[in-house]
Image (cartoon, coloured by chain):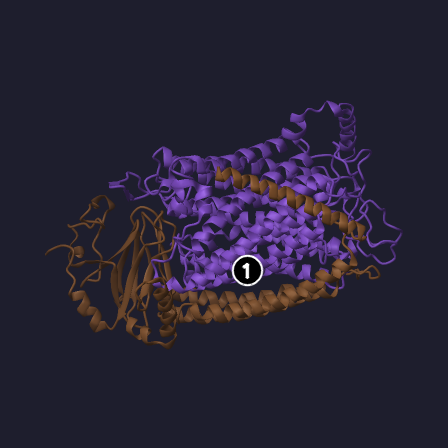
Chain colours: A purple, B brown
Amino acid sequence: MENHDQQAQSNHGHLEEHHHEESFVTKYIFSQDHKMISRQFLITAVIMAFIAMVMSFMFRLQLAWPGEKFWILNFLLGDKWAPDGVLEPGMYMQLVTIHGTIMVFMVLTGGLSGTFSNLLIPYQIGARDMASGFLNMLSYWFFFLSSAFMLAGFFVETGAASGGWTVYPPLSALPQAMDGSKLGMTLWLVSMSLFIISALLGGLNYIVTVLNLRTKGMTMTRLPLTIWAFLLTAVLGVLSFPVLFSAALLLIFDRSFGTSFYLSDIYIGGQALEQTGGSPILYEHLFWFLGHPEVYIIILPALGITSEIIAVNSRKPIFGYRAMIGSILAIAFLSFIVWGHHMFITGMNPFLGSVFVFTTLLIAIPSGVKAFNYITTLWKGNIQYTPAMLFSIALVSTFISGGLTGIILADSALDIPLHDTQFVTAHFHIVMGVSAILGMLAGVYHWFPKLFLRHMNKKLGYIHFWGTFISAYGVFFPMHFLGLAGLPRRYYSFTAFPMFDNLVDINIFITTFAMLAAFVQIIFMFNFIYSIFRGPKSEQNPWNSNTLEWTTPMENTHGNWPGKLPVVHRWPYDYSKPGKAHDFVPQTIPLEEGEVDGGGH
Amino acid sequence: MIKFLIYLAIILAVFAIGYLVRVFELASILKGDSPHKVTDKDNKFMSKIMMLFLVVFFVFAIWNLKTYGPLLLPDSASVHGAELDWLFNFNMIILFVVFVITHIALFYFAYKYYGRKENTATYFSHSNKLEMIWTIIPAIILAVIIILGLKVWNNITAPASKDAIVLQLYSKQFDWTARYAGKDNELGASNYKLITDENALGMDSTDTKGKDDIIVRNEFHIPVNKEIEFKLNAREVIHSAYLPHFKAQMNCVPGMTTMMHFTPTITTAEMRKKPYVINLMKGINALREKKGEKPEEFNYILLCNKICGNSHYNMQMTVVVESETDYNEWLKSKKTYFKN
């Protein structure tokens, strides 16, 4: 560590000399600085999230008022995909598919981990930068290319991929099966391959940095929970993304080279295909072997961010620090052996199903521990209601309510009638979509001063928060009832079924709240952009936090700390410690004589 | 031109809002407030809204149950469906209790402990006892949920009895075909390479087991209180045979045969007479009348529940459950596929 410190010191001195020689390109575009890369990830993700939100707005219009004409649809999609303002079924499929893919991968994996792992890992462990700035830069640019390829699908004649974000073969493997499985699907696979490269480069970097570049005194049990969450997220990604890559590779072979990994006994377009012996179930196994860890890749960083924000703003140590680490480890381990709960009714052996029921419900225990610990952290706190804190508390609420319906779906018998219905859509949107978005927004409000050296407007933040939180439940709470009434997901319209006629009211209700949600995100976008340029300048440690990122000066310098790297003497959660002058004790303050570290753990 | 004007209007609106925010920010600074620093007043105000939210959220949840509850599926019309209904309600009660307790705690603490300058938080970093409590109690509850769930799961997935009526559901883009095994209760062989426009299922004419097979479209009938074993196949992509009223579902996968079985307990005619269903249909038909569509009677339905292409949303078959005599009568009126 000492050695590294010296090296970084000299490196830093070197950079300072040439500080003004940095060109626009190396500073803003091909930057190797973790702070700039973090900003690049965030801004790309915000744009992608906005696009995905507009997509959801378009298909929600169709679901609430099927077949009705909306000039806005024609305005956005043109005459081919929305003639007279009525959405085409093919376009509907493209929109749900790409909305899902963008949100899951570009926004909540790339955007969330990319932004906050990059920003906080070097800052909070006391490192000058990531272990490899070059790989870090590549990680962003692969992500950027991947995002561009994902959107490119909408600009080809046959449209974007449209087999759902899980792109199950044979539907995705056979261009004859639907237009979306033609060029659009190829673009999807290219995009996803680039994304996997980006995730691996980023993930390896995060792991190496956390393990090797911690400053003096920063032991593993003095790491903020954010870093623990980012570390385990990266481990999950590095272990599971390659499996998705193999799944995609085999799919590419099946599509282009006539292999039959996933194809067997297929008759389509008036001809019997040669392929025999493959199994679509194989793809499902490979996909969900990533797919399930993936939801923890999404939610763990959000929970890490929440842990930090709730502790800081309750002015209390996070309750059960070691139990929190234990839960993260348990969740990370278990997430690898639960993927089969996505496949109870695919024809998988029922006994295997029972095993997956058991492992899946086990995950509820560490998840519950986390939820209870958050609630106890609030107890007897001195809660500071920054917008970030509001988002974090809301995350605890959605994590609980979404997690509870997960217990229903993890129960294989109960999953039979609910599988692939709107109940599932409601469940995973609340527990992983909304929760992770709330965590990401909390992080943006909390670390905005570190990202852009300025503050966001708090009143607009409050409006944004309440609008988002209320409309999130307004959208997804009633959606459970659609599923319980037997309404499948991914249906362009259900006017063909008289039994669903009376559900149209629920859909109108949902779409109304979706529009409210979209509207308040415009307020956020405005606040975000406005504050980058015009927000009030931030002071050094605006939230009175203990962690190291607030010990760096409020300017963007290479190497983070102008002088020596800080030395850590205590855990990060000494808030309101008895006998101290202030209600926070930064990690750099040495322990007094006889003082116990780590909250007496 | 109109597009250009719309863009222009949006850009101007954004700038206008920008200046408006600037004015508000300056005004609040003059009043001694800060545009970003949180004050005790903010804390108090937000904590009150937190409490208000909790109340509104619970009222909203109950309103949802009251308004949307009567739109849900009627009591399940199969033997295992009734078990599932019970299991679902049992789990839901547990989960609802947990939901209420955790939300009251979360929002009450958020309300009670809002930040005040003169206050200090309590330094409370961990408690092994508390953590044991909320590890062990959920573990016990989950054990109960797992055991009850797996019991039902094992019942559902146990092999069908030997005298179950065998029925193939064949799915393709975008319709269903049902094939009855006939007197021998065994389906004849089929091969996807034999598929033609006439022989949509690719049935093998050399297999004598298939001689008595009967193929029907649009609607299939099953007898009440008899176990039905479904053999599911797909022609080109994955489909899913979903029968919501019987709480039954299984994917149809190209290249393999999947299976499910259930015993219907309520005939279509009986279902139509149930007060709950009469009410349900009254609501539906009132809405249909408004739209100028003809009224409908209650029907069991089979639909596709795995994304299978652009017309995935319209792939259905009507299911009729009737007495065994009616069923036999109906089946007799159908011709076998191969002319003997």
Q: Which residue is mark 1?
A: A474
Q: Quadrant of residue B170?
A: bottom left
Q: Quadrant of the C terminus of chain B?
A: bottom left
Nearer-the-camera pick, B97 or A101: A101
Residue A1 visible in the shown view: yes
> Residue, x 56% and y 36% (percent of image)?
A143
Nearer-the-camera pick, B117 or A209: B117
Secondary structure category for the residue under label 1 = helix
Q: Please provide percent x and percent y for residue A535.
A: 72, 43
Left or right of A204, for residue A261? left
Residue A121 visible in the shown view: no
The amino acid type, in three-letter code, at marker 1 is Gly
Q: From this view, report whether residue A420 is shown above or below residue A114.
A: below
Which residue is at the far right? A593
Which chain is indicated by disc 1?
A: A
Mark 1: few/some/many CA within 10 Å (<14, 14-19, 20+): many
